[in-house]
Image: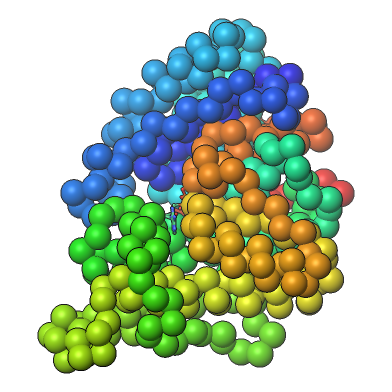
Amino acid sequence: MYILGIDTSCDDTCTAILEDGKRLLSNIVNSQVIVHHRYGGVVPELASREHIRNIVPVVRESLRKAHLNNRDIDAIAVTMGPGLVGALLVGIYFAKAFSYANNIPLIGINHLEGHILSIFLEKRSPPFPFVALTVSGGHTNIYHVHDFGDYTVLGQTLDDAAGEAFDKIAKLLYLGYPGGPEIEKLAATGRPEAIEFPRAYLSKDSLDFSFSGLKTAVALYFRKWRNQKTREHKIKIADIAASFQAAVVDILIDKVIAATDQVGVKSVVLAGGVARNNYLRCKLQKAMSKKGIDLYTPRLEFCTDNGAMIAVAGYHRIIRGERDDLTLDAKSRFPLDQIQTPH
Ligand code: KG4
Ligand code: ZN
């Protein structure tokens, strides 16, 4: 079974073709970074226009790479939310037209389900149940994953997502966009223990996150530092980046440990754009090994947004007999446990 997966939830036009839920025949990501770079963030209107320009050529490229044509595709899976509505609609309308024209099933996918299931694109995938941490530009969530299509939200961010905090701090420090990779690069030359930024753990047993206090603390520190009041401590800008990154990573790891204790699982999946961060990957690996928990992390290209993860999520819904019709619509907010799942 060939599934075409499409994601246009944010600033990348992503398509992929997956055979039988496992074999990836093509995975194309058309990045819009050049378009949004000078604004220091994603401009929704520009993102929609770029998706309109790109969607047909990117799907064609996917088919060409897979040595297939339209009529070979058996089903189409498309991200229906959460994300930028104008951007999502481009993928959704393309998918509806493709499904109608080729008379094949259509299935709408929650973007976060895609991130969680991206690990099933790898040879080494976890047994159910497991805990998943999805950390991206729009989301920071911890899930208890019981099975394909069966998820409980254990924790979520109350304000900024982890990736958003990376992007905002990068902007503050005059680094480029997207900010995560820039902070990571700079942090590699700094000292994580140089500045003790606050770590918000919220109430006891809470698995929720809050990064706004940390963001404010870094902004205040940076302004003071720039005015030279703290230069005598020999703090470099790289120390600020490293100390900020360490604070985010400490919070993420501590909450994952608490989640595994609460639900008693032996496997953890790390996914989403921030999962590309090597400092996070290494520290989480160490923490999990210490607790005898197996950590599963997708390769870097499957961490950031891609069509392959939507295709894999689509495959598991299609084989369960789920279908959407042409009334499928975009949802800017779409908690994962809102999905109707047949049990
Ligand atoms: O999953 P993704 O591609 O898009 C969303 O669904 O949001 O994640 C993008 C986010 C951006 O905020 C970006 O700064 C962050 O992932 N990111 C990183 C790294 N690479 C990407 N954050 C920290 N370290 C990185 N190396
Ligand atoms: Zn994403």
Task: Return the residue nearer the eye: 43 or 297.
Answer: 297
Residue furthest to the right in view is 343
Depth check, front residue: 139 or 67: 67
Taking the image as drawn, is residue 111 in sight? no
Which image quadrant for residue 337? bottom right
Q: Is residue 75 left or right of residue 34?
A: right
The residue drawn where x is 20% and y is 91% is 232
55 on left or right of 127: left
Q: Where is residue 196? Give x, y as percent.
A: 42, 87
Residue located at (16% from left, 91% from top): 229
Could you tell whether 12 is left or right of 297 in the image? left
On screen, residue 158 above or below 71? below
* Colouring of the image: rainbow
In the drawing, does residue 333 fall left or right of residue 102? left
- Image quarter where the N terminus lies is top right
Q: As drawn, which residue projects farthest toward the left? A: 227
| Quadrant in the picture for residue 243 | bottom left
Q: Could one spot residue 19 in this view of the protein?
A: yes
Q: Quadrant of residue 204?
A: bottom right
Number of disc labels: 0
Residues 271 and 329: in front is 271
Q: Position of residue 311 (x, y in %)?
A: 63, 32
233, above or below 340, in the image: below
Which residue is at a point 49% across and 84% down the rendered structure image?
A: 199
Residue at 69 percent across and 85 percent down: it is: 205
Image coordinates of residue 102 in percent, x first then y, are: 60, 12
Percent position (x, y) of residue 325? 63, 30
Q: Is residue 52 above or below residue 132?
A: above
